[in-house]
Amino acid sequence: MTRQVDVIAPHGGHLVNRIATEKEKEEFIALGESLPRVRLDEKAVSDLVMIAIGGFSPLQGFMDQKDYKTVVEYMRLANGLPWSIPITLSVSSEVADSLNIDSWVRLDDTEGHFIGVLALLEKYHYDKANEIINVYKTNDLKHPGVQVVDQQGEINLAGPIWLLERQAHPLFPQYQVDPQVSRELFQERGWKTIVGFQTRNPIHRAHEYIQKCALEVVDGLFLHPLVGVTKSDDIPADIRMRCYEILLENYFPPERVILAINPSAMRYAGPREAIFHAIIRKNYGCTHFIVGRDHAGVGDYYGTYDAQYIFDQFKPEELGIVPMKFEHAFYCTRTQQMATTKTSPSRPEERIHLSGTKVREMLRKGELPPPQFSRPEVAAELTKAMRVAN
């Protein structure tokens, strides 16, 4: 018999739903051809979806100037609630000049399809350089997150949004589990404590190790790979998802894991994005969140454990989700198992350290990742996919 449990409250206390009702959708579509249009890029489309389904609760739309400024400067919304990444809709001055405050704006996807509506309440200039250095801790244009902000428009549009329709994901409809549904699934399974895991890479042995360590102390694992916009050299989402399926089929207890996609876009903001990722998983119903080595980092822009230290800037009750901090895991040749410096007596030369970056390099060279890094079935799938791609 399934035990009834209470699921953790969403960030801000209420799970947002900005998906239009059938009546609202009909009204918006009737207005559609007469409304001024803004075409969204991929990141803005994913942000629109995440707002609408409640993944970015308590946000009802794109941030106004007051929230934007406090988030950039202090990692908090204007009401004091922790929030670390600005969620904004940026357009050129020309586009902004064509839009009127207190009016409807039609939102189109990258192909020009009508997907949402913005009630425009505010237009404001913002300081790109200040946002870049505060959020990304660098102004190096080689940083992918810095590039995005540098290239986007100079005016932010603010106001509540409506998503016309929640459509099935074109590649992974069976894994499209929105926050309301994930919360219901956790209740059905009787899970009181759930650990979320963020990834944009195929799961390697170090990931598997820390996930199973976490599973020893919580009821369930919410494996939540990001399938929104990533860097061009990241492993494609369809390949990553097949690797997750293979791993779960062979190496995890199925009753204790839920695999679902995260439609959010990567920012590569390191420490700030670790907080952001934790808040998102809280909205999905997770009570705990794994933070490992260089979480959401890229290159050498952030310290190895900066993404763990940043959680100390908030009171536990403010975030409302428990970070589970793990050291860099490696394969210990002495004990012949995965370990960290906390559990292994080995010397540095007895440790095999591999990362998502290194496995991508090996695959590009046609090399098979060793079993110490990747389960053989996963390595075979990655190698096969890379051969097809080349």
Image (cartoon, grey):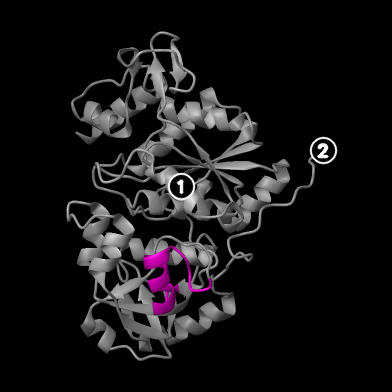
Q: Position of residue 237 (x, y in %)?
A: 36, 43
**Residue 276 in the image: x percent, y percent?**
45, 55
Q: Give the numbered dot on residue 220.
A: none
Q: Which residue is mark 1?
A: 172
Residue 22 belongs to magenta span? no
Give the structural element (helix, strand or loop) at label 1: loop
**311 left or right of 385 in image:** right
Identify the magenta region.
62-79
Is residue 31 rendered to the left or right of residue 389?
right
* Quadrant in which the N terminus appears: top right
Q: Residues within 10 Å of mark 1 (few under 14, many from 20)?
A: some
Q: Which residue matches tag 2?
A: 1
Above or below, 163 relative to 43: below
Q: Residue at x 52, y 81 (%)?
A: 26
Q: Residue at 28% across / 55% down in the picture?
A: 137
Left or right of residue 285: residue 236: left
Query: Looking at the rendering, in which quadrant would you find the C terminus?
Result: top left
Quadrant of residue 201 in the image? top left
Q: CA distance from mark 1 to mark 2?
A: 31 Å
Q: Position of residue 80 (x, y in %)?
A: 52, 69
On screen, residue 57 above or below 281: below
What's the residue type where badge 1 is placed? Phe
Dividing the picture into quarters, in which one does residue 238 lie? top left
Q: Give the secondary structure at mark 2.
A: loop
- Classify residue 113 by image quadrant: bottom left
Residue type, label 2: Met
> First in sequence: mark 1 or mark 2?
2
Q: Image point 45% across, 20% down: which residue? A: 339
- Pick the residue in front: 346 or 8: 346
Q: In the image shown, does 163 or 68 lie closer to the viewer? A: 68
Would residue 277 be seen by someone viewing this image from the given angle?
no
